Amino acid sequence: MVIEASAPGRVNLIGEHTDYNGGRCLPFAIDLRTTVVLRPRPSPRVTVRSVQAGAAVTVEFGDLRPGVRRDWSAHPLGVLWALAEDGWPVPGMDVAIDGAVPPGAGLASSAALGCAVATAVAGLRGGLVDDATRDRLAAACHRAETEFVGAPTGGMDQAVAMRGSAGHALLLDFGDGSRRSVPLAPADAGLTLQVIDTGHAHDLATEEGYADRRRECAAAADALGRPQLRGATAADLADIADPVLRARARHVVTEEERVDAVLVALEDADWTAVGAALTASHRSLRDDFAASTSALDLAVDSALTAGALGARLVGGGFGGSAVALTPRDRAADVRDAVDAAFAAADLPPPGHHEVTPAAGASVTSAQRWTARGPGAPR
């Protein structure tokens, strides 16, 4: 049996660095996807090939353990390890990978890759039958990211890659574990969501700033006598003596408030309020959380000057991309303004992607293997 499956990248509309603090976020799957083709083999050997990396890696399945791989192959191999640890039957296999989610852009390319591999493995047993299966696979992919790859992420990326739906964002509550689809259709209001890739890649597995923020948030919660910052209020901030920890907690507290504001604004179709919340989020991430960069600030500021309703960094910061909510008739102006600002700052041209809320992971085909075997994903 040959299984082809794909999974999307994501943009987090609002709720940055709230997931690992037990809070809420509102990401959506995007129409940039990673596709894998999986063919089981009779031996316990696993080969993963990547079109983008231009390389292949072969390992014995029994040799897989955290830390054994430090390159791109750690992401797919880690998922196979985590699935086996969770009790899934994982045979030896050949896996071909083709990703359209740009790596290092803050669009969850690693989660798209991992969830595509997990979905293909599930396809060997008949596919994704229900939301409980999707959640189980997302949990395995998150474990692969944190334990096998070593990236201390919060689980948002894998959840939306598995549970996203077209025309909707996904409200994730990491306090009570709930999930709820929220209609998100900016095009109906004559708007577009533009991703601006600064070209300054980030890697959460090696980025010290991200791990530092997690430790600082944990320390701030400890100063408040809480297991997490979830539920803390603005009034509580005065009880945090350290000014750095207080600033980190202030971002989380106010970001939770912005999640509420965006939910109300979406229900009221108040896109001006949505844009204002995005911009306020960026300022908080820049000033209180110290997660922005000069290139991200330049992308946000130039987009706003050119007419975007709101803009902010996405994907945790420390490099990567910004997203701008823009009137359709100003989209070209925003792109041109950002390009001009980067040129004036002697920076390489940024990348641009117009994204729409898309479906989550899926098996796209399943067929018997022929002597020709699977080729690279289309």
Image: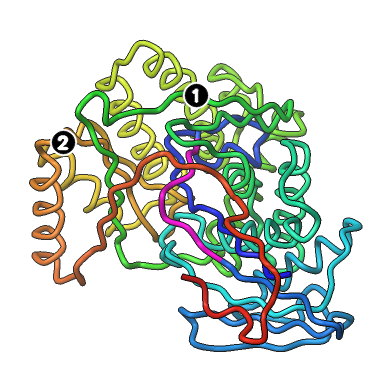
Name the mark on residue 53: none
Disc 1, disc 2: CB below 8 Å? no
Which residue is most to the top? 268
Q: Is residue 22 magenta?
A: no
Magenta: predominant secondary structure element?
strand
Circle 2 — which element? Answer: helix
State the residue position of label 2. 328
Quadrant in which residue 350 is drawn: bottom left
Amino acid type, residue under disc 1 in the picture? Val
Between residues 85 and 368, which one lies in front from this camera angle?
368
235, above or below 118, in the image: above
Image quadrant for the N terminus? bottom right
State the residue position of label 1. 182
The residue positioned 25% from the left and 57% from the top of the image is: 352
Horizontal and vertical percent for residue 223? 70, 34
User: Residue 25 vs residue 166: left or right?
Assistant: right
Q: Mark 2 or mark 1, which is nearer the start of the sequence?
A: 1
The residue positioned 45% from the left and 19% from the top of the image is: 263
Highlighted magenta segment, given as a residue range:
27-35
The residue positioned 69% from the left and 66% from the top of the image is: 150
Between residues 115 and 232, which one lies in front from this camera angle?
115
User: Residue 43 vs residue 324: left or right?
Assistant: right
Circle 1 — which element? Answer: strand
Horizontal and vertical percent for residue 233? 58, 19
Between residues 378 and 57, which one lies in front from this camera angle?
378
The residue positioned 48% from the left and 48% from the top of the image is: 10
Quadrant in which residue 294 is drawn: bottom left
Amino acid type, residue under disc 2 in the picture? Arg
Q: Residues within 10 Å of mark 1 (few under 14, many from 20)?
A: some
